[in-house]
Image (cartoon, rainbow, N blue to C red):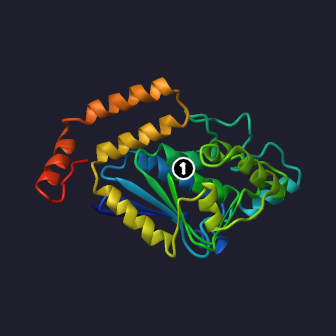
Amino acid sequence: MDQRVSDERVTVEIRDGVADVRLVRADKMNALDDAMFSALIDTGERLKTEAGVRAVVLSGEGRAFCAGLDMGSFQQMASGARGQGGGGEGLLTAKRTEGGSNRAQHACMVWREIPVPVIGAVHGVAFGGGFQLALGCDLRFVTPDVKLAVLEIKWGLVPDMAGMVLMRGLVRDDVARELTWTGRIFGGEEAVAIGLATRVCADPHAEALALAAEIAGKNPQAIRAGKRLLNLAAEADQHTVLREESREQGALIGSPNQVEAVMANLQKRSPQFAD
């Protein structure tokens, strides 16, 4: 299946089960304006139910992954506008998703809600909202010279695009506090060392696509079950996780794709899975 969908802010190319999603506001280093928020949410929601998608790669065109909130939003705040979240909406009055996100938060959380693995390929800069967008991915491949920052404090703010939820399972509490309070910029090697990136790569996009293709060759039901369990493990109690492990495994054992995985291994051939 080959498919390409273009938007003024985000493009999607689907090939062999892998959705290659790119932010394409390169002239603004893919900064987050209202149109970008809409494109990210719409794309993520569509990929939740897109037939045949088995893995997703999220990256940015041009010099950067995402430079964060568009400067126009900061200028609006400086003019005295109040109650503005990352997406320019009222903080407490905004409509929220079933998972509790407002619009700006959903632009990051939607990638965790996509039922297949999402790999972020991050280069150039990922500051503030752009960094939180990267955290929404399941994995993050970064260049050695990437520049990352929880930058909101520079503007007198706190992370409000799900950063607190997404950081808490990745780094020690004191590390999250130091990054939040200083806004300091750090690179790829440190990001891996402290848990905020998965791998340092010379070409994150190419390596992310390669891993996505590998994942797309596995039993898609098992991959999705694994993501459900990993998402659940971040917030549920031990008894719930253990019960769900058994439930997911019970549904997989003897299913057509699981049988195909066994037969392919025994017959030393490539498996042919159905979506």
Per the image, the residue denoted by label 1 is 41
Q: Nearer the viewer, residue 94 or 135?
A: 135
The image position of residue 89, as x and y in percent, is 72, 44
Residue furthest to the left in view is 267
The answer to whether 24 is drawn above or below residue 168 in the figure is: below
Task: Answer with left or right where residue 175 lies relative to residue 39.
Answer: right
Residue 7 in sight in this render: no
The image position of residue 150, as x and y in percent, is 72, 56
Crowding around mark 1 (Cα neighbors within 10 Å: few <14, some 14 to 19, many 20+) is many
Residue under the point 19% across and 55% down: 271
The answer to whether 175 is drawn above or below residue 32 in the figure is: above
Task: Answer with left or right where residue 122 lies relative to residue 243.
Answer: right
**Splitting the image into 4 quarters, where does residue 215 fall?**
bottom left
Q: Amino acid at mark 1?
A: Ile
Residue under the point 72% across and 49% down: 176
Residue under the point 87% across and 56% down: 78
Task: Answer with left or right where residue 26 lies relative to residue 202.
Answer: right
Q: Quadrant of the N terminus?
A: bottom left
Q: Nearer the viewer, residue 29 or 169?
A: 169
Residue under the point 60% across and 58% down: 36
The answer to whether 8 is drawn above or below residue 252 in the figure is: below
The image position of residue 26, as x and y in percent, is 60, 72
The image position of residue 123, as x and y in percent, is 58, 70
Check disc 1 and report its element: helix, strand or loop: helix
Residue 259 in sight in this render: yes
The total of numbered circles placed on residues is 1
